[in-house]
Amino acid sequence: PTGRSEYFKRGTTKQIMDQTPAITEQRKHEILAAAVKVFARAGLEKGKIVDIAQEAGIGKSTVYEYFASKDEIFLAIFNGFFQEYEQMFQHIAESDEAPETKIHMLIDTSFVYLKEMLEGPHAESWLILMEILVQGMRDQGHGQLKMSLADMFRSSMKMIEPIIAEGVASGVFRKIDQELGAFAIFAALDGIAMHYYLQRDRVDLEKIHALTTELIFNGLIAS
């Protein structure tokens, strides 16, 4: 409300309409960043809207202006992660590189992203994502989730399918079902990320990166 009155003092309604979306997105980002910190400290169950508001330096009612419930915040955090991941996949899929190079890029990008998520400034986000995923699977099983996790995963897998099809058509990859191939590659990368998080004190990331690349290509390349 205060920000909106400031806009009316500064200029026209058109200027307000032009600037408000950017401010709205910025405020959403601030709330989600605060939510990750709260959930990292207290967990998903104990972290509350009032705690998120305090972390963000705003009132509880302001949080509700952007998110109707804590579940909506969960979904927004998870969606943000997946959108970033999908953008990387899409960039690779739409590139002019050869299909075998694209697969290499998918694997390399996934491992680089995993390392950045676990060792970078946003490392606390990874555990939150795992918690949201587990809760989402439980809620989806009970028909309580407002989105389909399966659909979210499938949209990422779909980006791998044309790469496999292109490789098969060119004779570089052996003849395999492109949908199942995409499923296997995505599930392998996703599963490795989860298990590496749990056992990173026992597993060398560079070695598992190299071995994963070798195994995937051994299964794809035509003899």
Image (tube, rainbow, N blue to C red):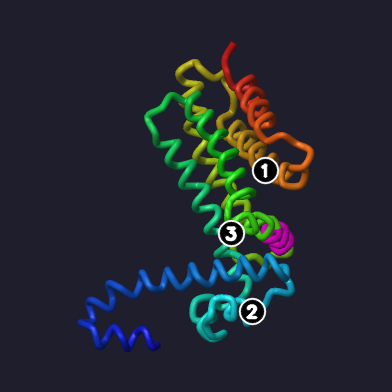
Image quarter of residue 140: bottom right
In the image, is residue 129 above or below residue 213? below
Residue 145 at what x, y percent from top left? 65, 65
Residue depicted at x 56% and y 44%: 113
Q: Which residue in the protein does label 2 denote? A: 51
Q: Are marks 1 and 3 in contact (CB under 8 Å)?
A: no
Residue depicted at x 67% and y 43%: 193
In the image, is residue 169 above or below residue 94? above
Q: Which amino acid type is shown beneath numbered disc 3?
A: Phe
Query: Where residue 193 is drawn, which disc sits there?
Result: 1
Residue 180 at what x, y percent from top left? 62, 33
- Dot 2 crowding, Cα within 10 Å, few <14, some 14–19, many 20+: some
- At mark 2, the secondary structure is helix
Residue 36 part of the magenta-drawn span: no
Q: Is residue 161 left or right of residue 210?
A: left
In this view, the residue in front, 202 or 221, is: 202
The residues colored magenta run 131-141
Query: Where residue 78 is drawn, which disc sits there?
Result: 3
